[in-house]
């Protein structure tokens, strides 16, 4: 059995290495839109939840026609009446307050999770300071924050 110190050291090393692959940036951005997403409803314990029988990868992706009430938001297709509700496919176990921003330098657009108080203070068109991390190899935005 390994001592707890060793496990803590390994966990700390993993965190340090994960941030070593990211580049921290900050700058000014414009608020494009705000969106509140309700927390996901938990199904009753005696009810079985549906699970996909096949994983959706690029190799077996299927093209389907969108219905007249379907919309695409952040690469998710959903009924327009479901957006922002607890049935939204982006819903998690907690409520989310998302602020979509566009960086002044470079024009990169991404969502920033904000707390409820900051979300309510912001308006579309406001200029805000944003700090975020970008993956060195993927260019993916991680750990963004409105200041």
Image: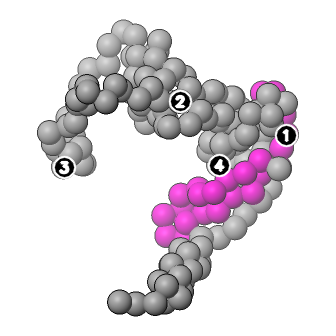
Residue located 82% across and 50% down the image: 147
Above or below — where is 16 with respect to 98?
below
Spatial CA span between label 4 and label 1 = 14 Å
Residue located 59% across and 56% down the image: 141
Visible residue check, residue 110: yes
Place residue 31 in its image quadrant. top right
> What secondary structure is marked by label 3?
loop
Read off the residue under disc 2.
39
Above or below — where is 133 with respect to 47?
below
Q: Which residues are magenta?
A: 122-146
Q: How many neighbours does mark 4 have within 10 angstroms: few (below 14), some (14-19), or many (20 or more)?
A: few
- 4 or 2: tag closer to the N-terminus: 2
Read off the residue under disc 4.
108
Read off the residue under disc 1.
127
Q: Within the magenta stretch, is there residue 3?
A: no
Place residue 27 in its image quadrant. bottom right
> What secondary structure is marked by label 2?
loop
Spatial CA span between label 2 and label 3 = 32 Å
Spatial CA span between label 1 and label 3 = 41 Å
- 4 or 1: tag closer to the N-terminus: 4
Spatial CA span between label 4 and label 2 = 28 Å
- 3 or 4: tag closer to the N-terminus: 3
Q: How many neighbours does mark 3 have within 10 angstroms: few (below 14), some (14-19), or many (20 or more)?
A: few
- 1 or 3: tag closer to the N-terminus: 3
In front of the other: label 2 or label 3?
2
The x and y percentages for residue 71 are: 44, 20
CB under 8 Å between callouts 2 and 3? no
Spatial CA span between label 2 and label 1 = 28 Å
Residue located 24% across and 48% down the image: 57
């Amino acid at each position: 059995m390994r001592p707890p110190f060793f496990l803590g050291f390994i966990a700390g090393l993993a965190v340090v290495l994960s941030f070593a692959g990211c580049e921290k940036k900050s700058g000014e951005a414009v608020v494009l839109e705000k969106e509140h997403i309700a927390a996901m409803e938990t199904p009753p314990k005696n009810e079985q939840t549906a699970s996909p029988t096949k994983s959706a990868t690029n190799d077996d992706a299927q093209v389907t026609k969108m219905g007249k009430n379907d919309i695409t938001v952040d690469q998710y297709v959903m009924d327009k009446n479901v957006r922002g509700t607890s049935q939204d496919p982006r819903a998690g176990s907690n409520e989310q307050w998302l602020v979509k921003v566009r960086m002044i330098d470079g024009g990169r657009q991404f969502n920033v999770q904000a707390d409820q108080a900051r979300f309510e203070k912001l308006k579309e068109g406001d200029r805000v300071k944003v700090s975020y991390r970008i993956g060195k190899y993927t260019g993916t935005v991680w750990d963004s924050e409105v200041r």
